[in-house]
Image (cartoon, helix red, strand yellow):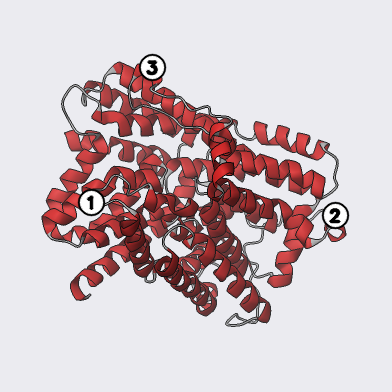
Amino acid sequence: MLLLVAFSAIITPFIFLVLLRMSAKIGMFFSALIVLALAFFVWGVDGRVIAASVLEGTHKTLTILFILFGAIVVLNTLRRTGAVDRINQGFRSISTDMRVQVVIVAFLFGSLIEGASGFGTPAAVTGPLMVALGFTPMAAAALALIADSSAVSYGAVGTPIQVGLSNLPDAGLSLYKEIGAQVAFLDLFAGTFIPFVLVVILTIFFGKKKGWKDAFQLFPWAFFVGITYTSSALLYATLFGHEFVAILASLTGLIVATTTAKKGFLLPKEEWKDALDENMKPSGDAPSMSLLTAWSPYLIIVVLLLVTRIVPFIKEAALTWVDWTWTDILGVEGITSDWEVLYSPGAVLVAAALLAVVIQRKPFRHFVEASKESFSSMKDAALALIATLALVQVFTNSGMNAQDLVSMPQYIAQTLAGSFGPMWILVAPFLGELGSFITGSATVSSLTFAPIQYNIAQETGLDTNTVLSLQVIGASAGNMICVHNVVAAGAVVGLSGREGDIIRKTLGPALLYGALAGLVGLVFTLFI
């Protein structure tokens, strides 16, 4: 009975969104009501804790909506200035093959944004950009989410490892570097195939002629780009540690991918455009703008994100100047929601949109009109996110109860661990995925489950670093399916209400990624 109650936070969204195909604002509302009721009546969570958790979720929703607004306003501003058409022109000069574009934009450029920012920003940035390139909104949302996976292990300057594993007994730079290198090694056999998976999803689900042939034509190049990314990630993780792996590996991959695509190396002669959205028409305003000027807002985004996270005095200012953090909500100690406004990727995105009209010498009204359009497009996402994060925070805070029970996530982990024993190595990535699916964060997944994974490894005689590495990889894979990322990715491409359809496209790749990681972990444990 208790296990079923603990799993309610996973089962109810799956039923309402995926099986019954409800919109997230309705499905997650019902899911939240069920989970809140079970937390109160079965788990014994105090009403004040539940109320504080709901307010915490609402506050966190505002932080996510700020990022969403920034991502949408950047694209809407650039559409008005003509920069998007110029960017499209630039991509066409590399390749007009949509299979190539999805690897370069969603996987490699998305990984660069992930390495600089994290917080679900990559899909919010690359999804709209892909729509502007001619991908259908559904293809853009699903592919952006799937692509934002391998790089998530390292996230914003190493946060998923450095913060996610910070509450372990052996926590410290030595452990973080070891885990960073082992994650990169295991990902050689899982993350390498993400570019090809993207191509498969694109051709089979969104191509006019559905089949494997068009996907396998690109396998040599996709595999080459994938192995370039993951092998360089291993090199950087081994040499420099965990902090800049995603940034350096994605830059390496971008250089290799764009160079080989221009030369046609390992690419089929016939370019594939079978998934092109016929409704997307360039405005014709593009040729008057240089490519550097058109791309400048995105370059500004990467630079500002890095500066605010690396330069100490700027980071300190961003964290402290405008701090809307809500501490000990309703007097409940430990229920706190952080919001350092200037440190948020949302602030960087809005700044980039403002600077775009200056650099591209366009009227300020472009930004004003883009802002109005962006606000009006976020209503459904706001309702869905409030319900989603209310559920997440009640689930996470359920350890504060009158029944002397552990929290729901801990109960799930401990029950599963007792069932699998030494074969836990195959399950470890899926616990990481589960954490990300519910909490919406690879970092929070590891903060929640890494101590449990560590204890299970010790009890079953498994190598602790291997199990922890699989936790980190699994948490990254869970980024593809976590509800609030899906809501955000759908909102920025105009698909609010179709979150269940998006999850149906991303669930298979997420499970495949976890299975591959587990199998590699098993082989590594047995033979290395």
- The three-letter amino acid code for the residue at tag 3 is Leu
Q: Position of residue 306 (x, y in %)?
A: 58, 51
Q: Which residue is mark 3?
A: 330
Q: Which residue is mark 1?
A: 453
Image quarter hosting the C terminus: bottom left
State which mark lies toward you, 3 or 2: 3
The residue carrying pointer 2 sits among few (fewer than 14), some (14 to 19) or many (20 or more) residues within 10 Å by Cα, namely some
Q: Residue at x 64, y 72 (%)?
A: 258
State which mark lies toward you, 2 or 1: 1
Q: Secondary structure at mark 2?
A: loop
Q: Nearest the camera: 447 or 125?
A: 447
The residue carrying pointer 3 sits among few (fewer than 14), some (14 to 19) or many (20 or more) residues within 10 Å by Cα, namely some
Q: Residue at x 60, y 39 (%)?
A: 346
Q: Is residue 373 left or right of residue 289?
A: left
Residue 513, picture quadrant: bottom left
Q: Which residue is mark 2?
A: 285
**231 up-or-down from 471: above or below:** below
N-terminal-most mark, 1 or 3: 3
